[in-house]
Amino acid sequence: MTAVEVSVVLPAYNEEAQLRETVEITLDHLGAFLPAGTFEVLIAEDGCTDRTPEIADELVAEYDAVRHVHSSERRGRGGALEYAFRQAEGETLAYLDTDLATDMRHLETLIESVRSEGYDVATGSRRLEESDADRPAKRGVPSRGYNGLVRLLLRSTVRDHQCGFKAFDRAVLFDLLDSVEDDHWFWDTELLVRAQRSGYRVREFPVEWTPQEDSKVDLVRDVFGMGSQIVRTWWQLSVSPRITRPVALGAGTALVLLALLLMTLYLDPSEVFSRIGDADPALLVVAGAVYLCSWPLRGTRYRDILATIGYRERWTFLTGAVFISQTGNLVFPARAGDAVRAYIIKARRSIPYPSGFASLAVERVYDLLTITVLAGTVLVALAATGSAGDLQAAVLGEPVDGDQSASGQTALLVAGAVGLAVLFAVALIVWTARSERNYVRWLVDRLSSDRYADTVATVVEQFAGDIQTVAVNRRAFVVIGATSLVIWSIDVLVAVIVALAFGVDIGLALLVGASFFAVSVGNLAKVLPLSPGGIGLYEGAFTLLMVALTPIGTVLALSIAIVDHAIKNVVTLVGGGVSMALLNVSLTSAVEENPTEEAHPQD
């Protein structure tokens, strides 16, 4: 049985300038209150590129209490500490930042808090009233913000989570390590939070602290790295355990009800019912049934997108996921409801978030590209036949009808900007996919040299790579593009049927052509959450274009637009509600054919 009671780890990455002095100071202070042979100092050398490994070996040869824990590749700050702790022999385990910014006269307090006073975890603090810490504003302000977020979101009572001066009971530390996922700067924060959640005794005591080197805010490390880890831990500890099936059903029901309520902000229910009363109810039912037929196609298209990326999944499940995300988009601005779908396929089928969001981006690009092409085709046809004069007059502001005219003009400007942005985005995706240069890694490396940069770059690379995979796959482009064309043609067909339900008799060719243009521009305009004049951009664009291109009057055109949009939203809400019930509550094959089923990457 070893006589070592205390193990102190010094994380070392390129510390050749100060490693020897740090080790010797640490040995001296440990020897001042511990018997010889009862302590050890481990140098956790983390893939260094300078003389740190050689100096560590020299110190091992000089001092019996020193051990060198080498890693040929960078593990990250937390990863290097954990690797060293697993090789330590003491029952009390501690680590100190190698710059010894914390005054070493506090070392005995740190060690004895765990070794003899019964605490499970001890940490120095620069943020207690009794602390003496000289922190410049450029380090203190971000630190206060970070600690405030941890205390608020993760319900921690500790005031300073990042002080590199901590000690642990061996059994407690090893009990916590399996649940700690971060391996870099957030590692010790996560340990402290999980220790508190597990009911362990944590002591935070004031220290004298002097910064030993300059530091700067690192966008990737501090925002993407640490920030994302706070959100991830909050989700795991506070949200995920509460998402039971009854809760999910309640949330889904609330989402549908909220979507219904929000619809009344831009559609007056009494006006909708009044206008429906002027239409043929049988044809309106047909319009709803036709629109419903597009949803299996949406699920099939999403299946093909995921298959191209490398995941095989059933179109039935994916149709439900699309229904739910579209219902969310009726509530959340800027299509933020799509995040719900990324969560569903991650939680139910273990498809990684980067691939989930990439598949959503691909779907959105195909949607916008298809309706841009449809609108552009009709516009070219109008110009070729000399029929664009009325449209030009409407766009330039010649009066159509008050609010509808203003709303429609705004919608056309938005639609044009969105269409140009989509064409540019498609060109950029194809160009970068065919380039041999890694632009993601180049950009992230310019922003940060921290190890988190590699993690962030890997995630972004996966996201961008999945999008590029679909973009350069000719078969996928044809199949997914053809499905998108059918989906949006059905969308136009619904508008045509609604117009017929109102008794419009202007010639089928003119009605279909005008509807293609009006529906395409209206959907492009909906990308931005604007609603001038109390009229939705979709309704405004649809009304303006139908009036400009056909003999239909403003009131009738607006009636068609309102009812057309209402039918589509109602079908979406009903489908979303049914899908939420199936995906979150019912033991159906749509979701949980196997509780442990995962996505099936293709060979």
Image (spheres, rainbow, N blue to C red):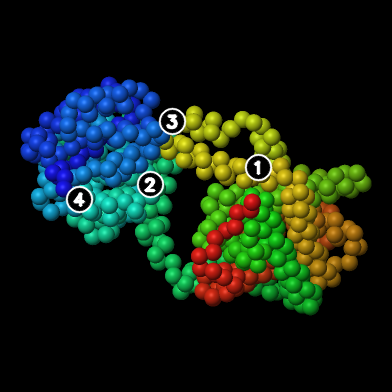
Mark 3 to mark 2 CA distance (whole Å): 18 Å
Earlier sequence position, callout 4 versus callout 2:
4
- Foreground residue among 520 and 226: 226
Mark 4 to mark 1 CA distance (whole Å): 49 Å
Determine which quarter of the picture holds residue 69: top left
Which dot marks residue 169?
4
Amino acid at pointer 4:
Asp
Amino acid at pointer 2:
Asp
- For mark 2, give the secondary structure: loop
Binning the other alpha carbons within 10 Å of mark 4 as few (below 14), some (14 to 19) or many (20 upward) gives: many
Q: Position of residue 94 (x, y in %)?
A: 21, 42
Which dot marks residue 182?
2
Q: Is residue 394 visible?
A: no
Would you say 472 lies left or right of 311 here?
right
Q: Are marks 2 and 1 in contact (CB under 8 Å)?
A: no
Is 159 drawn above or below residue 320 in the view shown? above
- For mark 3, give the secondary structure: loop
Which dot marks residue 468?
1
